[in-house]
Amino acid sequence: MLLARTMRIGLLLAARSRRTILGHRDGRGWASSFIVHRRLPSRKPPPPTSPFVGDVGRRRSVARCMRPASSFSSTSSSSSSSSSFEAPEPPTSHGTPVFPDIEFRRGNDNDEGVTTATGRRNADEDAIFVVSGSSRGIGLQFVIALLGRTAGKVLACCRSPSSARRLNELIDAYPDRLVVMPLDLEDQSTINDLARTIATEYRRVDVLLNVAGILGDGGRTTSGPERSISGIEREWMERSFIVNVIGPTMLTRALSPLMRTNGGRKFARVTCGGITDGDVVEVELPIGRPPTIIVNLSARVGSISDNMSGGWYSYRMSKSALNMATRTMGHELRRQGTWIVSLHPGTTDTELSSPFRRGVDGRRLFPVEFTVEKLLAVIESLDDRNTGGFYDWAGKALPF
């Protein structure tokens, strides 16, 4: 009896001592800190929703779509062809669009023959179609589609024509209609040279498709698209703005004089250098052309009012700036008979989206043929009311 009583007292004293010691340590603050660090490893703030995944659902974490995707050729596409692929309705945007939706129409023919603006443009053997970023992805598919649906010449512009294998293969099939020309949007001299060549040899531009752009690979070799403020790097942001905004703007500035269809002036002055250096080519413009068209390939993530997830700083900001350029140029270019729009292509199965496409619902990952088919349907249905606007692949106006 005495032994049992002694043991119970000893256990009670030990328990009190343990509580006292633990409480003393917690009171000093270092024990609880030690436990937290051992049992709860530090966590980074949750990454923002991937804008690519945003077309599927704005609450899905970017962690899933940041997994490495298998490499693929820029000419490869989903097993679904553009004719059989059916995309769901585009997601609802936050904010209010200020332009009307596109009214789709058949632009190439009607009961009276080729009379619409698109039909006249596509049937004109002298028409000039300029495509930047044309060696792969959406740009390459634009070249293929234009060669198939128009009668004019396609000037396919890319950084390295000699290594553009698919373009060089197309030249064999279209030797009289396809010309591959050097263009590096980070090098102003190539923009000047391109403008000079087009002004002297072709003397007009009927459609300009500014397709080239950069996004980044999610941190594998580039800092973009940045998932947080701490990931922003000056060099990458500067490059994003040069390629996504400054380059297309300077190319538009160089070629837009060759796109004038209104007004009494018969001659265009194409500036092939600085404003004050006197490097100007003067050409006589054709008469009787339908309105000319400029397309800036943008992205839904460039919408300020629709930004509900954050992240992707350089890409978002550069596309927002590109949309502002489109809106501002729309006022001026309308007077010369040129229409300009920004278009969101949707998440397309190309090299640009490959680091992020595994987080995208298959219904939202478009074959490149489908994307270009839809974008051309929008382009061929434009009218004066749409110039300066921001639209998606389905022709729905997006908020700025």
Image (tube, rainbow, N blue to C red):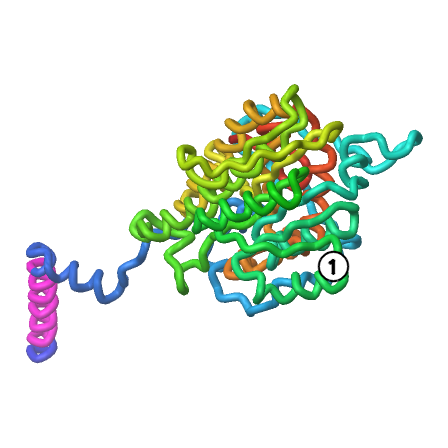
In the image shown, does 257 or 301 lie closer to the viewer? 257
Q: Provide residue 288's location: percent of width, then percent of height.
A: 75, 28
| Residue 29 position within the rendered picture, expressed as x and y whole percent measured from the top left | 10, 56
| Left or right relative to 184: residue 107 | right
In magenta, the rendered stretch is 5-24
Q: Which residue is the extreme one toward the top? A: 264
Residue type indicated by callout 1: Pro
Residue 396 in picture, x, y percent from top left: 65, 34
- Pinpoint residue 195: horizontal percent, then vertical percent: 55, 43
Please tell me whether residue 247 is drawn above or below residue 119 in the rendered image.
Answer: below
Looking at this view, is 127 or 370 the one in front?
127
Q: Residue furthest bottom?
A: 3
Residue at 67%, 61% (x, y): give it: 77
Question: Would you name the residue on which mark 1 appears?
Answer: 175
Q: Residues within 10 Å of mark 1 (few under 14, many from 20)?
A: few
Residue under the image location 49 percent in, 50 percent down: 190
User: In the image, is residue 218 above or below residue 118?
Assistant: below
Q: Is residue 381 left or right of residue 303?
A: right
